[in-house]
Image (tube, rainbow, N blue to C red):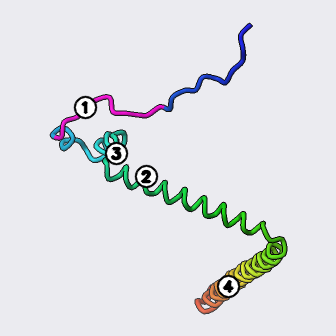
Amino acid sequence: MATKGPPARKEKFIPRNKKNVTPAELKKMAPQQKARYRAYEDPSKDVLNLVMNTQQRLRQHATKEHQDLYMKTADPKADMALGKQEKLIGQLKAAEARNRIRIMRLRYQSMRVSKVNQVFADHYVLGDDAR
């Protein structure tokens, strides 16, 4: 009887260039072909350093957010006050959005009425009413 264990972990596929291209051949390539080729090259040390710095900042930001979240829930009275304040802010934002939509609707309707009036005015000025 075979024992069940965790499934064998597959290694992550890393795409690589199969063909090594000389700098002279790279210069001769069209820009799109060159971009396709460079997309699968290993990044330079500068880029790797930048990526590592970015990941480190993201980790620091995530731990700070986690700590802030923990501090919020530590005090129930402050948490309730914060919840009320966030609810009020949400209601105000919703009211502002409704007002913007109302203004846009009124502007559209007035432009449409003015267009219709303009068509009627042009029709009667040109004398197209003779049938």
- The image's mark for residue 107 is 4
Judging by the rendered image, the residue that carries numbered circle 1 is 20
Q: Earlier in the sequence, mark 2 or mark 1?
A: 1
Residue density around tag 1, few if under 14, some if 14–19, many if 20 or more, within 10 Å: few
Q: Earlier in the sequence, mark 1 or mark 4?
A: 1
* Eye-nearest disc, 1 or 3: 3
Give the secondary structure at mark 1: loop
Q: Is residue 73 above or below residue 28?
A: below
Judging by the rendered image, the residue that carries numbered circle 3 is 43
Picture coordinates of residue 9, whole percent (x, y): 58, 26
Q: Is residue 107 above or below residue 78?
A: below
Instruction: Estimate the spatial distance between the alpha carbons at disc 2 and disc 1, rounded to whole Å.
Output: 27 Å
Magenta residue span:
13-23
Picture coordinates of residue 18, whole percent (x, y): 32, 28
Instruction: Estimate the spatial distance between the alpha carbons at disc 1 and disc 3, rounded to whole Å.
Output: 15 Å
Picture coordinates of residue 69, whole percent (x, y): 71, 64
Instruction: Estimate the spatial distance between the alpha carbons at disc 2 and disc 3, rounded to whole Å.
Output: 12 Å
Q: Disc 3 residue type?
A: Pro
* Eye-nearest disc, 4 or 3: 3
Residue density around tag 4, few if under 14, some if 14–19, many if 20 or more, within 10 Å: few
Q: Disc 4 residue type?
A: Arg
Judging by the rendered image, the residue that carries numbered circle 2 is 52
Residue density around tag 2, few if under 14, some if 14–19, many if 20 or more, within 10 Å: few
Residue drawn at 25 percent across, 31 percent down: 20
Magenta segment includes 40: no
Q: Are marks 1 and 3 in contact (CB under 8 Å)?
A: no
Q: Earlier in the sequence, mark 4 or mark 2?
A: 2
Q: Disc 1 residue type?
A: Asn
Q: Is residue 22 above or below residue 82?
A: above
Q: Earlier in the sequence, mark 4 or mark 3?
A: 3
